[in-house]
Image (spheres, grey):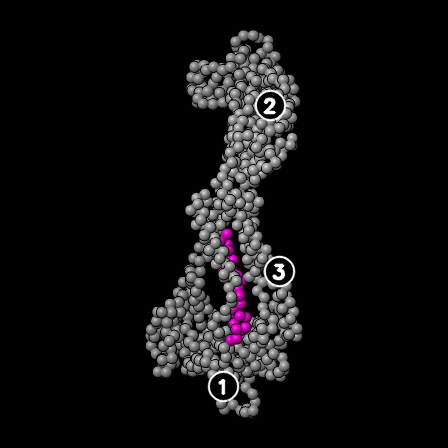
Amino acid sequence: MVLLILKFILLMVVILTSLYSALMYSARKRESARQLTELRGRAEPLRRLSLEERQALAPFLFRPDRPGKPVRLHSEEVFPLSGAYHRHGISSQGNQTWHHMIGGVEVILPFDAEHFLDQDNQAEVVFADKLAVVVRLNGFELLEGAAREQRRETARDQWRRGESGHLQDVTLDDEDAPGDPADEDPHRVEILHQRDETPAEIEARQGRGLGLLSGLCWSLAFVAVALAASRQSTLWLGLWAALAVAGAALGLWLFWRRWRPGPAGKVNRVTGYLNLMPVSVDEQRQTVSVAPVLGDKFPFSLPDHWRPRIELEQGRRLDLGLRVDDYSVVDYSEANTPGRRFSVDEEQRRHPPVYWGRHLTLALVGLVALAAALTGPARPVLDAAQAGQWLAGSVPLPVDDPASLATADPPALGRRLMISGRGRCQVSAGEGRVRCDRVRWGGEAPVPPDLEVDPLTRSLLNGEVLETRRERSLEVMALMRGGGTGDRRPLVVSNARAVLATIEEACPDDGDRACAELRRRALATFYFPAAPEEEDWATLRRRLAEQDDAEHREAVALQGRVENLRGVMRRVAEQRLRPLTRQLAEALAEQQRGGVVIGTVRGTDLIALPQQDPHGQRWDTLRALAGEPHDFKLDGVVVRRDHTEDGAPLWLLDPERVDRGGPALARLLWVAAAAGLLLVHGVLALRGYLAAKSRRRALERQYPA
């Protein structure tokens, strides 16, 4: 219930948060439209768009929230717009849509205009539907942005092709600026050549994974074998077993198949100067995070284990091998230290990587599967014995003589026995527990001691102490007061005074808790017309003893209270009977000798003993054990062979394992496969982990700091 309430609260929070975000998003859109309307009403046009500007804007005339829906220019007049910049957005199905605002008006930023934003912005815009399209922004010019985009596309094409030579600059310096032609341009990047990735570099990029797919196949195989072990039908057993074998075979193939490198990517060999570009500022720690950039072109990334050993210094000339797709470094060297070179290909070949995580994944799968089997239905020793009997084609063994189970060559564990005979239930000393799921077959007949239940205890047990009758006049009076039926039906207790005397005889000790409860219930149950207000036991007994007439002998009681009083009487009687029961049980337990003890692990009684009295059942059951033995039958699989305390052979059978040799074999294979998976891959994972540590030390020696 608490979990449902928490889920409901979480759902309401999500719904209300989403509703609030949608309302705020709509409110910002309306405010932007209002600001745009005011701007149109007061702004004066500065000029008109040129034909070149009109053509450059065409690819950007679409709504930001609906990229496929175009917007229409109202006119080609250009208007001024100024103000602070901010943006807002909304997420929908994992997609984030941003709306750029200048001076409260939503604008479209073409090309790289976003890079020219400032706290206080001066822009020139044209109006299109409910938006403004930027033509100029601070230092941004539309046609210059288009030219930069063209050069950027040219540089991308050159980079993809790996064409040797100077890589196209996106931002052009002033050609008339003075300078020494011999000076090196820190932003210049040269492409030397392009090559394919080596197999070692492909492996470093792709890796071997964590074996998750193989682990999934093994997990499904274990689920299938668990389902096979729970099926009685041979058809379903075979079907699930076949699926388990297929899953395990696929898992083995996926894990141990020969690795083949995928398609080789392209690597460009480039040279240029290192620039450290700031990307974020932590004002609390007063630190600036920087990213390494080659020239002003490529923010490249180094392998993690190289970073502590490479000192990135602004302006240092580098020779790099960069992957074309992601600008990751596969080869690193510095112009001023030619002997210091980092190479993915060389280190992969000299120190092959160790993928111990894949073995750890399968070892964990094996561990979970083994734990599920051992804490569930699997009993490896017993399953192996039963599966062996099933595979050997053994037939059920009829047993009608206890001597055949006490020989030097008894039936093996896992064998199916069909036992029929006459025996007696086992008795546990102390509390006198009778276990009819354990039967002594062929033992000595016990001789019960001379113990009898006194008449008072017997009468309290069966409720014969109370004598009641119905009185029509009392029932009519009770009906008039809203009662008279069910537990509220009034009864006349004709021997109420005698009942009190019996209670006094059965409970001479005032300190006994059960007796005190019996007296209290009797006072609350009986209503004596001659003593209607007496609430004290001794006073009531004395007053009733003074007179011997019908008015003092009879009492009125409700039927429900009479039944409750009988229940308390039975508890008192059972308390009186307990010492006798204990003596009888100990005597019978001491006489249990010889024969063979047959039992079932399912707790089902093999003998149904007759019970003459619904109360005092333990006493009557113990007395019945002293009579003739009773017939019993048991059809089950031997799951345990042992001896009782008196040395008699003990045979425990499981009836539910009959005709279940196939599931036993499935459980055995489940445990064997899980244990093998855990053992093999656990050892390999440990070896791989140690080898990985050794490889890290070797790389530290190869790349000293």
Residue of label 3: 686
Q: Residue at x 46, y 57 (%)?
A: 17
Direction from residue 530 to residue 124 in the image, left or right: left
- Whichever of labels 1 and 3 marks the residue nearer the N terminus, that label is 1
Dominant secondary-structure state across the stretch colored magenta: helix
Q: Position of residue 444 (x, y in %)?
A: 61, 25
Residue of label 1: 165
Q: Position of residue 413 (x, y in %)?
A: 56, 40
State the separation of the CA atoms marked 1 and 2.
Answer: 110 Å
Q: Residue furthest top?
A: 548
Residue 154 in view here: yes
Report which quarter residue 442 is drawn in.
top right
Q: Residue at x 62, y 62 (%)?
A: 687
Query: What residue span does the magenta drawing correspond to?
Result: 197-222
Direction from residue 622 to residue 249 in the image, left or right: left
Amino acid type of the residue that numbered disc 3 sits on in the rendered structure: Leu
Give above or below for 553 relative to 79: above
Report which quarter residue 445 is drawn in.
top right
Q: Is residue 213 magenta?
A: yes
Residue of label 2: 445
Q: Is residue 86 magenta?
A: no
Q: Position of residue 645 (x, y in %)?
A: 65, 32
- Whichever of labels 2 and 3 marks the residue nearer the N terminus, that label is 2
Q: Nearer the viewer, residue 427 or 332?
A: 427
- Whichever of labels 1 and 2 marks the residue nearer the N terminus, that label is 1
Residues packed near mark 3 inside 10 Å, few (<14), some (14 to 19) or many (20 plus): some
State the separation of the CA atoms marked 2 and 3.
Answer: 63 Å
Amino acid type of the residue that numbered disc 1 sits on in the rendered structure: Gly
Q: In the image, which is nearer the foreground, mark 1 or mark 2? A: 2
Amino acid type of the residue that numbered disc 2 sits on in the rendered structure: Ala
Q: Residue at x 54, y 41 (%)?
A: 414
